[in-house]
Image: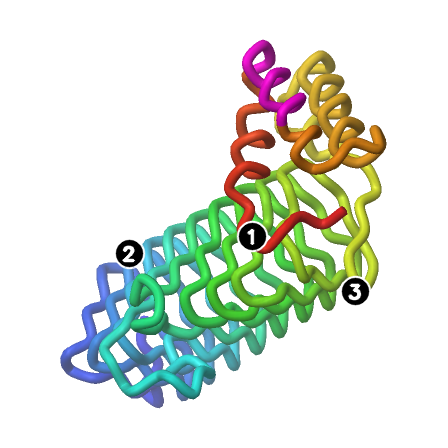
Amino acid sequence: MIHPTAIIHPGARLAEGVSVGAYSLIGEHVEIGEGTRIGPHVVIEGHTRIGRDNEIFQFCSIGAQPQDKKYDAEPTRLEIGDRNTIREFCSFNVGTSQDAHVTRVGNDNWVMAYVHVAHDCVVGDNVIFANNATLAGHVQVGDWAILGGFTGVHQFVRVGAHSFCGVGTVLLQDLPPFVTVSGNPAKPHGINSEGLKRRGYSAEAIASIKRAYRTLYRSGLTLAEARAQIDEMARQQPELALFAGFIADSGRGLVR
């Protein structure tokens, strides 16, 4: 399962069923779970923990030092969950002491070629990154979000669960859950109705999310007024709790 040209540090911990392709390098502080497949010419370094049944394709850089001038070789980490597909030429960096010391990627994510996940990012589960999607440092991406090709996300921005970014989107502010955006800078274009249907949301739940969207984006209310109305709606409609909570916690302001 280990190609003879691969170089694996004696301190690395590889579980049963891990395969490593030709000319790949595995560093001293790397841990890889059962059934994970590492392609050829992959470099995995730093304090990196990878779960089980992942597939990492050729020419990826996993666990390298962050692209942050403040980084001073502190032993920060990268944690990747289970069943992720990471395609060619992706780069995932470890965290920094400026945040939680760790970059985290969850489970069942589909990551296409040339994607960059910078230091201290937190990526949830079932996320799709199309080719060349790029996260700056300290970005949070919620479950089931979809980032179209060449999407760029500014540092400290949050991307809400079930949201959708069209190709070439530039996110400079927080994107609420369920919302579809595109453009540079991003502008809202309704909710991700099709994605919600595929994930089992009822017609009634989708209708209530649409009403909350119209309250935020089409009513002419101030943000404070819209928040108050959405909070009241969420008390009666539990599916809006995610939407209301995200708006209340926004630090960079919302895409509007």
The residue positioned farthest toward the left in the image shown: 11
The residue identified by callout 3 is: 168
Q: Where's residue 92, x and y in %?
A: 46, 72
The residue identified by callout 1 is: 158
Distance of label 1 from label 3 (alpha carbons):
17 Å
Q: Which residues are magenta?
A: 228-237
Q: Where's residue 202, x and y in %?
A: 67, 15
Q: Is residue 250 left or right of residue 190?
A: left
Which-is-in-front pick, marks 1 and 2?
Answer: 1
The residue identified by callout 2 is: 34
Q: Earlier in the sequence, mark 1 or mark 2?
A: 2
Disc 2, SS? loop
**In the rendered structure, which amino acid carries the disc numbered 2?**
Glu
Q: Residue at x 49, y 69 (%)?
A: 137
**In the rendered structure, which amino acid carries the disc numbered 3?**
Gly
Q: Name the image quarter holding residue 222.
A: top right
Which-is-in-front pick, marks 2 and 3?
Answer: 3
Q: Is residue 253 left or right of residue 119?
A: right
Assess disc 3: are there few (<14), some (14-19) or many (≥20) residues with their C-alpha within 10 Å of its C-alpha.
Answer: some
Q: Earlier in the sequence, mark 2 or mark 3?
A: 2
Distance of label 1 from label 2 (alpha carbons):
32 Å
Task: Specify whether residue 18 is painted magenta.
Answer: no
- What sort of colour scheme is used for the picture? rainbow
Q: Is residue 4 above or below residue 12?
A: below
**Nearest to the observer: residue 215 or residue 80:** 215
